[in-house]
Amino acid sequence: MPDADTAPLISMQGVSKFFDEFQALKDVSLCVKEGERVVVCGPSGSGKSTLIRCINRLEAHEAGDIVVDGVTLSDKTLDHIRGTVGMVFQQFNLFPHLTVLENLTLGPRRALGLSEEEAEARAMLYLERVRIPDQANKLPRQLSGGQQQRVAIARSLCMEPRILLFDEPTSALDPEMIAEVLDVMVELARSGMTMIVVTHEMGFARKVADTMVFMDKGEIVEIGPPEQVFKAPKSARFATFLNQILNH
Amino acid sequence: MNRIFLLVPLLLLTGCGGANWGWYIIDPTTTTGWNNLKFLASGAYWTIALSLTAICFSVVIGLLIALPGLSKHRGWRGVNRTYVELVRAVPILVLILWVWYGLPVVSGINLTIFWAGVLALALSDSAFQAEIFRAGIQSVARGQYEAAQSISLNYRDTMRYVILPQAIRRILPALGNQFVYMIKMSSLVSVIGMQELTRKANELSVSVYRPLEIYTILVVEYLILILIVSAGVRWLERKMQAAEQ
């Protein structure tokens, strides 16, 4: 558990987000400290993906403040904040026309200004960390889903972010491939990376989460350490949700 | 290979039709015939130069016009729509005449016939190119933009390294068709005196009075050029597909 006295790395205060008439986030506030692992769960349409997509402004919020590492998110600070925050997507979103190595070196070379050699060395380092250095010269389509997602994690790590956001990273995977991706994420969590993970993998949540967040209808309904919220859900909605997830 | 058979009906037509053919005027075994053939073929250089230069410009202009069309801001999209609608409404022949006779008067810029032809063809085609690019770029999944943003790529790099390489693969057949179209439209530049294939055929036709044979040769000349271009586009498509597998 991170030190309770340190200033939050991410602070969301009163954040609201609308898609036309539909309010996806309703006055949401959340603080995440350096090294903290937050798992966000909730039924589909509850706003959990929108919540993390607001942090690196893949969705622009309409009200409230998002402060990342002391910098308030705005159009002006967006580049700085995107350099601090990495993201892993449900559909991997690898660049299909580029090899694994090119996928990994593109950001470091173009956005961080690394030389080709430096970028490749860094890419190989993180490919080893996700345990697929031998796939460096393949195209994404030649890899399994699990391997593709690990490449996507490595691609984010190559930017050396301080925070990693995961948007349902195992939801598009065949069951037999979920474990290999979760293993990499557990390892990342143990290395001290600050993570916000939207997932329904409750085993993963129990294993690594410092904080469990349950969202429903655009609001944070329940928040707390996993052992506490799992054992004694305060709200009926969360209890029902847990029941559905764990007994399906 | 199958495309070679396209020539068969043409040969049948020229050989077996009831018309009174006078192939002697382009018989390569006679000096006059050989010279006439050389004269006709000499226009190929300008047809190719004109179409190639114009397609290069039209692709660049088309892309530059397509990008504001994808903007979130209504003003930028308006620029795109206005350009596309305006340019598409002008017939190519009219644009060629206007660029050649009108542009020097209003702008003081005196273009050579070649550059006037290139400008008119490129402008006219660019509106179509813009629409092709817009469709191609829009067909790239939103997740690709988001992934590019999440690794801090700026707009230029996102387009250059992520979006356009994927979009261009998809629109390559359409771009190839547009090039074929450009070769055909380049014949219109003959009206302002460009010495390309059609103009050469016109000139020979009025001096030897055998339009049937000469324009038949002209048809074959365009057919050969276009078959080569189509084959080239197919080859490129296959190569890009192979690179992806």
Image (tube, coloured by chain):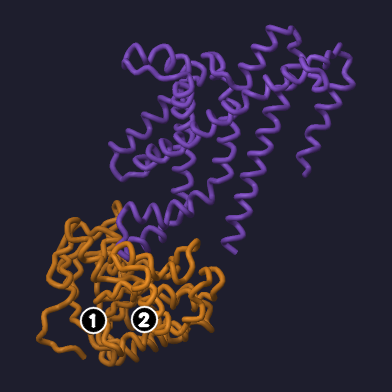
**N-terminal-most mark, 2 or 1:** 1
Q: Is residue B225 left or right of residue A50?
A: right
Q: Residue under circle 2? A: A240
Residue at 48% across, 50% down = B167
Q: As drawn, is A98 to the left or to the right of B10?
A: left
Q: Disc 2 versus disc 1: distance between alpha carbons?
A: 16 Å
Q: Nearer the viewer, residue B167 or B230?
A: B230
* Amino acid found under the numbered disc labelled 2: Thr
Return the x and y of residue B138 as percentages of the image width and height: 44, 48
**For the residue labelled by badge 2, is the local secondary structure a helix, a strand or a loop?**
helix
**Dot 2 falls on which chain?**
A
Whole-percent x and y of residue B12?
A: 86, 26
Q: Position of residue B16 (x, y in %)?
A: 90, 21
Instruction: Place residue B224 in its image quadrant.
Output: top right
Which tint was used for chain B? purple
Q: Residue at x 84, y 14 (%)?
A: B21
Q: Nearer the viewer, mark 2 or mark 1?
A: 1
* Label 2 environment density (alpha carbons within 10 Å; few <14, some 14–19, many ≥20): few
Quadrant of the rendering where the N terminus of chain B is positioned: top right
Q: Quadrant of the C terminus of chain B?
A: bottom right
Decide: is A116 above or below B99: below
Q: What numbered label is drawn on residue A223?
A: 1
The kind of residue tagged 1 is Ile
Residue visible at 31% across and 90% down? Answer: A190
Report x, y in % for residue A69.
Answer: 16, 73
Disc count in the image? Answer: 2
> As displayed, is residue B33 above or below residue B167?
above
Residue at (37, 44) in percent of width and height: B70
Q: Which chain is orange?
A: A
Q: Which residue is at the front of the view, A213 or A181?
A: A181
Q: Is residue A215 left or right of residue B164?
A: left
